[in-house]
Amino acid sequence: MAEECRYLIKRVREGQSVAMQSHNGPCPLLALCNCLFLSQRADPPAGIQWANTQQLASIVAEVLLARGQQSPSDANLQQTLSDAIALLPSLEKGLDVNVGFSGPSQFEFTPQIALFDLCGVRLFHCWAIDPQDPRTPTIQKLKYNDAVVRAKDDTVIQTWLEETGGVQCTSYGLICVAEQLRESELAVLFRSSHFSVIHKHQGRVFNLVTDVGYSDSEVVWESVDGIDGDSSFFTAKFAPFVSEEEKKQKKALKNDHQLAIQLQRAEEDRASIKKHHHSQEDDCTLF
């Protein structure tokens, strides 16, 4: 019997909490819920430290039902919402995503992808080809599934997938995400077969840190700076995170600096006293 997935609820700031991931996996349900939590369109289960998949799915279902209540006579919408709610438990294990290489918002439409739109959350990826790349005419019209099939007979496509498939990301794709993401917007980014919450703050894109290993840490956000993994951690208020060890080191350096200043001043005082003493001796010999 498979172990039930559980998600630790972490309070990140006054009135805001997120669910943390205690197991490996893509978990688009977690990302979708955290978008709803941070935008305060939904609240985590009250009075508990850990939530399960059913509880998270119920939270998204309530958001979808609330949308349905706005248009009760729209039969098509009601059916779409009903189908979407039925899909929610399956999101725990992942989501089949077929990205289009022409831009970060290009996906093959599926009922699962529609879930994000129904919840008012935009979905992005960063696996897009730069228009300046000479391979663009071949690559930009493809989606991933088509590219995999055609790569067997096309070295251009095969090379592109080999170069970019490891991280499912390009520098151009990240630039496009940063440009298309609105200031203060919460969205979901699909990257390296993983779904995560992204947020734009003062023109910079941040990724929500949901690894349960950071549940007791002030770390909440991680900067999205490039494809090489070179990033920095930030607090809930987007201040650079400083670890306790770094704080101790800075305090020690500050103490050392203050001690050096005190020693220098003491040396200067001794030199001044010595100079004054010699001056008095010289004055005595003049008389």
Image (cartoon, rainbow, N blue to C red):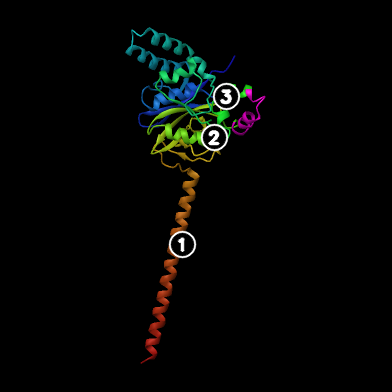
SS class, disc 3: helix
Numbered circle sitting on residue 144: 3
Say few, some or many: other residues with alpha carbon within 10 Å of mark 2 (under 14 / 14 to 19 / 20 or more): many
Whether residue 94 sits left or right of residue 76 in the image: it is: right
Whether residue 133 sits left or right of residue 265 in the image: it is: right
Mark 3 or 1: in front is 3
Say few, some or many: other residues with alpha carbon within 10 Å of mark 1 (under 14 / 14 to 19 / 20 or more): few
**Residue 239: image location, x then y, percent:** 41, 41
Numbered circle sitting on residue 147: none
Rendered position, 59 above or below 269: above
Q: Quadrant of residue 36?
A: top left
Q: Is residue 197 visible?
A: yes
Magenta residue span: 150-164
Three-letter amino acid code of the residue under disc 2: Thr
Three-letter amino acid code of the residue under disc 3: Tyr
Q: Quadrant of residue 205?
A: top left
The residue that mark 1 highlights is 260
Residue in view at x 45 percent, y 65 percent: 263
Residue in view at x 48 percent, y 13 percent: 87
Q: Nearer the viewer, residue 9 or 123?
A: 123
The residue that mark 2 highlights is 170
Three-letter amino acid code of the residue under disc 1: Ala
Q: Nearer the viewer, residue 260 or 210?
A: 210
Rendered position, 96 above or below 248: above
Rendered position, 19 above or below 85: below
Q: Is residue 220 visible?
A: no
